[in-house]
Amino acid sequence: IHPATPPTGTYATDAKTIVGFDPDFAQLVADALGLKLELQAVAWADWPLGLTSGKYDAVISNVGVTEQRKEKFDFSTYRLGLHGFYVKKDSKITSIKEPKDIAGLRVISASGTNQERIALEWNRLNVAAGLKPAELQYFDDDAARTLALVSGRADVNFNPNAPQAYQAAKDGQIKSVGTVNAGWPNKSDVAITTRKGSGLADALTQAANGLIKSGQYAQALDRWKLAEEALPKSETN
């Protein structure tokens, strides 16, 4: 797990205990399978190598399913992959749903991500339609993104929805004006990631579906204000 982004995963006030929806759900899955959970904190960039080398059995850290990743890994989906458009509280922007809605805006994104891919494609469509492209801006962390937004240096933050929804509820400086699936124009959900052919994915998917049916999944989502990212069922790959 990469404990850097509440509410999916972060450190508690003791700076050691990992808390959030992802560790909560991992514990529920482990309990359902009768296994002992051993959480290991890793940098986001290190999880693919650690998983393929056998250092970890599974990764639960907001990993979105993509066709490219499916060539190397198996997946058990457990949350909608939503990216959110957030603006400062008093912004005149009220809704972003389609490419024309970002035309000419200063949009914060993250390099090499699904959200950047979507923004670039929306820019291409806008230019083809005779509209201005959005100006993409890149910042290293959430604090810098928020500062750029509330100070007026950017118009929109377009990044994963969960941490932005959490922040909006926590400090009230920003607000949501829309969401889009991470796989736009297709679907890309968030999944527990395992080694290709390890045989773990089906068991994890079955455990997840049991938690969905029992209501424990919904309770965990509610606890972290993530109800809108609920999946009706978990699927393998």
Image (cartoon, rainbow, N blue to C red):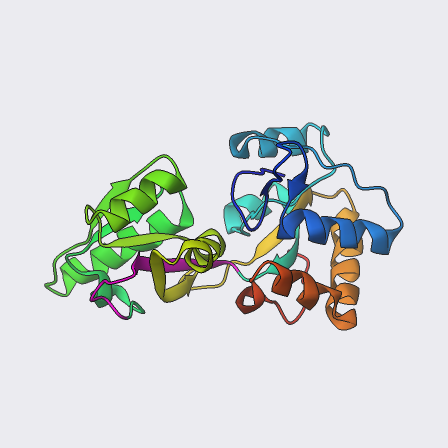
Q: Is residue 181 above or below residue 163?
A: below
In the picture, measured across the screen, residue 36 lies left or right of residue 224, that is right
Residue 30's spot in the image, x, y percent? 81, 49
Q: Nearer the viewer, residue 16 or 139?
A: 16
| Count of numbered labels shown in the rendering | 0
Image quarter hosting the N terminus: top right
Looking at the image, which residue is at 53% across and 47% down?
A: 6
Find residue 52 and report its image quarter. top right
Q: Is residue 231 above or below residue 117?
A: below
Q: Which residue is most to the right?
A: 34
Q: Is residue 181 above or below residue 159?
A: below
Q: Nearer the viewer, residue 155 or 116?
A: 155
Residue 149's spot in the image, x, y percent? 27, 49
Image quarter hosting the C terminus: bottom right
Looking at the image, which residue is at 79% across and 66% down?
A: 210
Q: Is residue 89 magenta?
A: yes
In the picture, measured across the screen, residue 103 lies left or right of residue 146, that is left
Q: Nearer the viewer, residue 124 or 168?
A: 168
In the picture, measured across the screen, residue 102 lies left or right of residue 213, that is left
Looking at the image, which residue is at 40% across and 65% down?
A: 179
Residue 213's spot in the image, x, y percent? 76, 72
In the picture, measured across the screen, residue 129 lies left or right of residue 164, that is left
Q: Is residue 111 visible?
A: no
Looking at the image, which residue is at 62% across and 49% down?
A: 20
Q: Is residue 51 magenta?
A: no
Q: Nearer the viewer, residue 90 or 192?
A: 90
Residue 85's spot in the image, x, y percent? 34, 59
Q: Is residue 153 visible?
A: yes
Span colored in magenta: 81-94
